[in-house]
Every structure is written in C-alpha cells, then in structure tokens.
Image (spheres, rainbow, N blue to C red):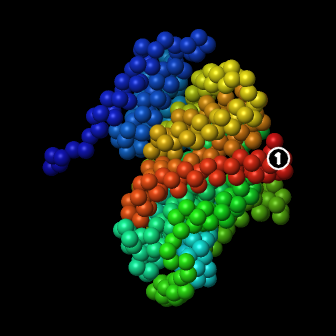
Amino acid sequence: MQNRLDPIKPIPAAISIALTLIIWFVIPIPEGVAPNAWHLLALFVGTIAAIIGKALPIGGVSIVAIALVAITGVTNPGNSKAALADALSGFSNDLIWLIGVAVMLSISLGKTGLGSRIGYSLIAIFGKRTLGIAYALGLAETALAPVTPSNTARGGGIIHPIMRSIADSFGSKPERGSTEKIGRYLALVNYNFNPITSALFITATAPNPLIVSLIYEGTDPNYTISWLTWTKAALLPALISLILLPLIIYVIYPPQIKKTPDAPKFAKQKLAELGPLTLAEKITMSTFILLLMLWAGVPAMIFGDAFIVQPTTAAFLGLAILICSGVLTWDDVLKNKGAWDTIVWFAALVMMASFLGKLGLVSWLANSVGTGINHLGVSWWAGSILLVLIYVFTHYFFASTTAHITAMFGAFFAAGIALGAPPMLLAFALAFSSSIMSSLTHYGTGTAPIIFGSGYTTLGEWWKAGFVVTVINLIIWLSVGSLWWKFLGFW
C-alpha cells in the first residue's frame, strides 16, 4: 500500500490559482473583450504560471488545464458537450502528432548506437585540432537535428556524452584548473550549437510546430509554413551561425589545448567498440533518409502533386517501418514518456492558444501592444526589432521555451502585423529567435541543465558566453536572415 504521495507543489500552485482568480474576478474586463475570452485568458495565465513554477510536470498541468476549459465552458458557454470537444481539439492537430511520433522515431538513434557512430565518425575525420572537434560536434548536431525533435535528447543525451568522453581523454575534468584545458570550451560549444540546430528544422525541437500553429492562427492559410519552407528560410543564417559559433567561443574562452592529434585515434577506438554497422543501424539510417526526402517533398518534385506526402503521414510511415523491422518494439514506444508527455502538453497549449485567437483576445492584446509602440512614433521595422528584442530577452524570466512561446509569441506576432510589418518577415524573425534565445541562461531549455550540470563551466562563464552568442546570432538572423527571406520572396 502506497503511503507516500507526490502532490502538487503548494506555493507555485497557490500563485497560479491566485493569478487565475484575480484576472477572472477582480480585474475589470476591458472594453471590446468578451467575458468568456477574458476568463480563458485567466485560465491560460494560471496555466503558464503553473508551468513556470513547476507546480506539476508540464503534462500534469496540461491535464488540469484541459479539465478546467471543459468544465468552465469558456470556449463554448452553455454547451458542455461542445466545450469538451473544444478542450480535446488539440489532439486532432497533425503537427502535434508529427512531433510526438518524431520523438518516438529518435529512440532508434540511441538504441542502435547510430547517433554515437555519427558523432565519433566526424571526430575521426575532423578532430586533429580542438576547433576541428568543435565543428565535428556541430556537424553531428546538425545531422541529427531533423529527426530528433527533442533538443534535450540530441544535445544532452547524444552529443554531450561524446563531448565528455573527448574532454576526459585529454585529462580535462569538470573542475577548476582542469576544465580550462578543453572541457569548458567544448561544453560551451556543445550547448550553444543546440539552439542553432533547433532553429534549422521544424522537427528539431518540439515547440517549433507550436510556432507554426500560432502563425497560422495569427494570419490566414496563405501563410502556412511547410517543413521545406522553414528549412529554406533558416538555411543561410543557420549556416553562418554554425560556422562562427566555435570561433566566437574560442575568442571568449580559448582552450589551453589547441591541437588534438590523438582525438581521431580515440574516436576510432570508440568506433571499433561499436563494431561494424549493424542491420538495425542500416534500417534506421535508410528510414531517416526516406523521411528527409518525404519531408522535403522530393517525390512531389519528381512525379507531381499526386505524390505529396504530408509530414505527419511520413512520420507515421517511418515509425511503422522501424516497428515492423524490429528496430523498435511497441514496448519501446510505450515506454517513451517524453513522446506521450509532449503530445499531451502540446495539445493543451495549442488548444488554449488557438481559442484565445478565435475569441479575439490575441487581437486585443496585439492592438494594445501596437498602440503602445505607435506612441513612440517609430517605423514598423524599428517597432518590429523592439518587439523581437523584448521577446528574446524576457527569456531570462522563463525556464521553458514552450511556456515563453505560448505566453508571448501570438500577441507579439499580431502586434508586429498591426504595426505594418510584412507577416512572413516578422514570423521568421520571431520563430527563429524562439530557439536562439535559449543560449541566454543555464535553465533556458532542457539541454542547458544537463550540460551546465556536468560542471565544466561556472555560472558567470555560461551567462557571459550565452549573452554574447545570443547578440551575435540575433544580428546574423535579423540582418542576413531578412535579406535572405527577401531573396526567397517571402516578403
């Protein structure tokens, strides 16, 4: 009999409930806002506060949110059945299942050893210098990014153990006087690659499809963003950021060990331990190549629109291949708590964000923010830059990119459009900034605590590097990026 319980955390829960009740009952409903829209905002703010304060795991908070939306009927007053359908509507969003299934697919990278093999293979080729090792880690991150929507699993679960093994092989331990040899440098590179690769593909981190949904809600179907469109838009600025990142960290915190002639030998030893490419790895690699071709629309390019395969359909096909071949078992899928957790919280947040838009609350917030900026008397481009900067640097107050995006993206996007900004220019600026801002802190996304917690850097070193990297990335993505998007005809 279980006597020990793990209930909701009282202080974060009390704050969340208090905020909900204050907005619902105390703050007057603004003119032009429907009462049920205002009440949904109260539930939404309470949900975000509970996520930030970690009153429960994010999936648990999401279940509570779904229950409250259904029982209060805020989306459909007076019709309990319709309100329940609204509360569950997020589960019908195909982008939610794309990410959930892609997380399931990524299990195969660790189970078969293919992820580690890719990393060590690149180090065996490029690892004669410390900079070469850094670029090898970046190449490995980029190669894995399209099929690992958990940036935490990719940067913290696959790349970080490889990085630690290399640092250990050079006697660089996570302690002062030793980490400066090479460990500190590689740890900072290891982490700061992660936000860039997360921005490169829709499927590189779970919140990206949420952003696509918010863009759709804030404009119209003409501005939907496909997997290929997102990648094309991100390609040039991401390439520049990936090339410059190791050099930036090299200048800020140069490693004491500059040449690493033994690194390729070490990587080859690790590859020898892995043995020849197994049948499971071959099937996994072939499946991922197939997925990338389908996501990029290659069959449709060759044979016409009749061969278009929706990204979520392709993801299910890939999972079916891995299950039927035995690379993954159904137990593997069932045990992947991260995938099912993502589906639940994603569905709840998309549902609430969607109805905030449908009920007119996002438009009201956008007009309020836009009016405030208009009073400054600045042009749309200056106002848009101001919006992006506020959006990015408020990430210091968030321990979750998902919570940050859900709380602010829709309103800031709508506010920028109200200022006169071209929709796709603003959409890409905010979308890619949503990943870039993760560099700022040691708690900004799930990868950060893993790498920071390994002890190779101090808090001051982490924050300094993160601030510099974020500023430089913003300059690249807002300048080169905007010209690139203009060249592609997106605005």
- x and y, in percent, of residue 21 in the image: 39, 20
Q: Residue at x 61, y 82 (%)?
A: 125
Q: Is residue 121 above or below residue 141?
A: below
- x and y, in percent, of residue 139 in the image: 62, 70
Q: Which residue is mark 1?
A: 486
- For the image shown, how many numbered marks are present on the structure? 1
Q: Is residue 224 above or below residue 362?
A: below
- x and y, in percent, of residue 23 in the image: 45, 19
Q: Residue at x 76, y 52 (%)?
A: 480
385 vs 163, nearest the viewer = 385
- Mark 1 element type: helix
Say whether residue 473 is left or right of residue 252.
right
Q: Residue at x 43, y 62 (%)?
A: 457
Quadrant (top left, top right, bottom left, bottom right) of the C terminus: top right
Q: Is any part of residue 217 visible from this angle?
A: no
Q: Is any part of residue 32 visible from this angle?
A: yes
302 vs 481, nearest the viewer = 481
**Residue type, label 1:** Lys
448 vs 217, nearest the viewer = 448
